[in-house]
Amino acid sequence: METTKNKQITAMILGIASLVIPNIGTSITNAIDTSNNSGSLAAGIVIMVATLAAIVVGVIGMIKSAGVRKEATAAGEKKVLATIGLITSIVGTVESAIVFFSCGLCIACVACAAASM
Amino acid sequence: MYPFIEIFGKTIGTYGIATAAGMLVAALVFYFLLREKEVAFEDVVITGLIYAGGAVIGAHIIYGITNTDKIITLFKNIKDYGFIDFVVTLFGNYFGGMVFYGGMLGGLVALLIADKVSQKYFRGADMFDAVAVVIPLFHVFGRIGCFFGGCCYGIPSEFGFTAHGNTLYPSLNDVNRLPIQLIEACLNLILFFVLLALYKKKKFPHRMIIVYFFTYPVIRFCDEFFRGDEIRGFFMGLSTSQIISILLFTFAIIVTVKDLIQKKASGSAKT
């Protein structure tokens, strides 16, 4: 019986969630009318919150997957799901971090919109 | 300059992509360097995560320090600002940027703390030297990102490139400038290969970071004179990075002298 299976599934779900969350944010942003200041502000906030949430989930996913991989190695069990969790967490976190840290335009838009409200 | 590029309809900063590529390559090299020491893939990932966390905090703090005068003025005039204005000005403008030295030192401090707290993933005795080897490799990508981003640039010069249409920094446009970021990227690449050779030959065990502190600050101190941007803060005619370079070089000398004294003392104790 695999003792780490549930933990591996949790880690994988966290990894996949870190990939999906920013795309949900993008979909919501696309539905917002950004032709006015309050719309731009809302869109900027949604993107920032979504990417930040994905970073948090991804980091937790990475820590969780790494821990489970170590446990599975020690127990001599397969660690495929934990590896998927680790890789998806890395990709999700890096993708979100790029958008969050390099999207100066988003922050500038939010700042401008906030200042002119 | 290409500060932003479009991928799948998304506008993404070139600097971010270069940084991510640098992290990936550095992590791979780090993994291959440590394979013989039974370091697992997850150890590398968590080490990278710890370093990145410390680096982000450190880079923003040092950037904030370069804006100390502005932050003091902001707090003096706090009554003139609304809450959102204040937060945006403080964290967006004055702490919003990142400084390489802050990132490097923040990451190293985070790893030192991790090593002290728990050695589950990061084991300083085995892994610290490899960290020192990959720092300049990551920096190569960072500097290429800087070049494309146009955020920092060289002095006007006959040799170099002329940028047109940089909307982030219009003052950069239409002036032929020395590609100082690319020069620093090349020097970092050379430094990486030197450190890699020293690491492979097992020279300076547990002191690779000191070798790095002897070399990179010299490169940085010199190349700061050829930078045309002035957003990094200056003190007594020297930039913040030059002051940090002097401090790191001094630290390296102190550690080396201390090591030599200890070596001499242990040598005389044996005889």
Image (cartoon, coloured by chain):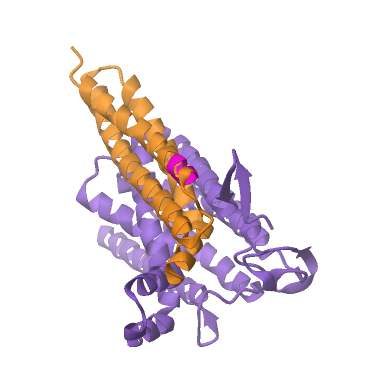
Chain colours: A orange, B purple
Residue B180 falls inside the magenta stretch:
no
Give the residue at x 68% y 73%: B171
Question: Based on the displayed image, in which of its 4 quarters is residue B227 positioned?
Answer: bottom right
In-front residue for pair A112/B211 = A112
Query: Does B7 sit above or below residue B92?
Result: above
Left or right of B209? Residue B228 is right
Going by the picture, which residue comes out furthest to the top? A1
Left or right of B157? Residue A18 is left
Q: Position of residue B114 (x, y in %)?
A: 27, 51
- Asked whether residue B104 is in view, the answer is yes
In-front residue for pair A97/A31 = A31
Q: Position of residue A66 (x, y in %)?
A: 30, 34
- Asked whether residue B256 is in view, the answer is no
Give the residue at x 20% y 51%: B117
Question: Based on the displayed image, in which of its 4 quarters is residue B186 positioned?
Answer: bottom right
Residue A27 falls inside the magenta stretch:
yes
Q: Position of residue B167 (x, y in %)?
A: 66, 64
Q: Position of residue B65 (x, y in %)?
A: 40, 75
Residues shaded magenta? A26-30
Left or right of B61? Residue B133 is right
Question: Based on the displayed image, in which of its 4 quarters is residue B170 positioned?
Answer: bottom right
Give the residue at x 50% y 78%: B233
Going by the picture, which residue comes out furthest to the right? B158
**Quarter of the figure with the N terminus of chain B:** bottom right
**Quarter of the figure with the C terminus of chain B:** bottom left
In-front residue for pair A111/B125 = A111
Query: Does B61 sit above or below residue B137?
Result: below
Left or right of A49? Residue B235 is right
Give the residue at x 48% y 57%: A40
